[in-house]
């Protein structure tokens, strides 16, 4: 009994002398010593900077894997990739226009200047080169095509045989769609496999403008 009482007294005395715990302050974000963040950086400073291909391949494959776990089929996966690229297109448009020379930094409001902007400045910013071709559908008036013989986004993706119709360039199609909508020329953009013997990985980006956009284009052509 004496030993039990002594044990109780030791426990109570330890509890009494224990310092009360104080709540820890939330950890704040670290900032550089010069107090400048990425938002203070000149927008033209990184215009020629290049991203490591290994870093891009890893990040993009993780994006595809993340989307694949939450879909039920190929079309659903391409739709999710398209949705991931769309906000990037909306944000790239004002940045690229800001970096253009003053005489050409005008937001495209016609179909042909918009397609040339996508084919040139946008493609150079994303992939370091221009796209390979721009075409107008001979049968459907509101459909245009931009071709890329070797899309960078498909070079590091291994597609299983049962999903051979999948084209991960749907992510780039989302970027194009964001640029089109940002210019006020509403369009639906999709990526399609168009491989040939010379270019087996060729992708065709089908840009289908809304009827109102085509009608407006016809009216502007008639006023010339």
Image (tube, helix red, strand yellow):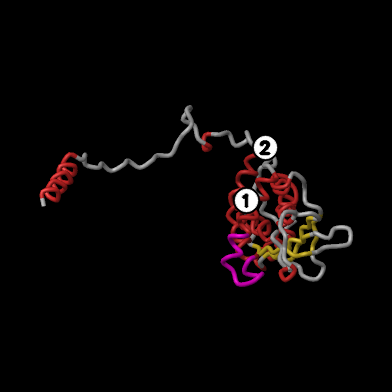
Q: Is residue 142 above or below residue 178?
A: below
- Front residue (pair 4, 160): 4
Mark positioned earlier in the residue sequence (2 or 1)? 2
Residue 150 visible in the snapshot = yes
Residue 100 location, x and y as percent?
68, 40
Residue 76 is a magenta residue: yes
Residue 54 is a magenta residue: no
Per the image, the residue denoted by label 2 is 49
User: Would residue 180 appear left or right of 39 to someone viewing this image?
Assistant: right
Residue at coordinates 60% horizontally, 37% vertically from top-left? Answer: 43
Please state the extent of the stretch shown in magenta in the rendering: 65-77
**Which residue ends up furthest to the right in the rendered image?**
197
Quarter location, residue 148? bottom right
Q: Residues within 10 Å of mark 1 (few under 14, many from 20)?
A: few
**Which residue ends up furthest to the top in the rendered image?**
34
Distance from the alpha carbon under mark 2 to that under mark 1: 18 Å
Residue at coordinates 35% horizontally, 42% vertically from top-left? Answer: 26
Quarter location, residue 51? top right
Q: Is residue 137 above or below residue 119?
A: below
Q: Are marks 2 and 1 in contact (CB under 8 Å)?
A: no
Residue 111 location, x and y as percent?
71, 57
Per the image, the residue denoted by label 1 is 59
Residue at coordinates 69% horizontally, 46% vertically from top-left? Answer: 54
Nearer the observer: mark 2 or 1; the answer is 1
Secondary structure found at label 1: helix
């Amino acid at each position: 009994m004496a030993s039990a009482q002594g044990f109780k007294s030791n426990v109570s005395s330890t509890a009494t002398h224990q310092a009360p715990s104080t709540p820890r302050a939330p950890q704040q974000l670290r900032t550089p010593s010069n107090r400048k963040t990425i938002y203070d950086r000149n927008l033209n400073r990184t215009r020629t900077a290049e991203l490591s291909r290994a870093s891009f391949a890893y990040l993009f494959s993780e994006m595809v894997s993340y989307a694949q776990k939450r879909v039920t089929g190929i079309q659903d996966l391409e739709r999710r990739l398209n949705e991931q690229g769309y906000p990037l297109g909306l944000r790239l448009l004002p940045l690229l226009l800001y970096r253009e020379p003053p005489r050409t930094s005008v937001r495209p409001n016609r179909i042909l200047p918009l397609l040339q902007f996508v084919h040139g400045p946008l493609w150079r910013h994303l992939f370091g080169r221009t796209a390979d071709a721009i075409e107008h559908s001979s049968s459907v008036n509101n459909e245009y095509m931009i071709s890329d013989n070797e899309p960078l986004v498909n070079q590091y993706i291994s597609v299983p045989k049962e999903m051979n119709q999948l084209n991960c360039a749907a992510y780039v199609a989302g970027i194009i769609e964001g640029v089109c909508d940002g210019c006020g020329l509403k369009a639906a953009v999709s990526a399609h496999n168009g491989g040939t013997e010379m270019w087996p990985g060729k992708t065709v980006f089908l840009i289908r403008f809304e009827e109102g956009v085509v009608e407006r284009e016809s009216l502007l052509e008639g006023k010339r």
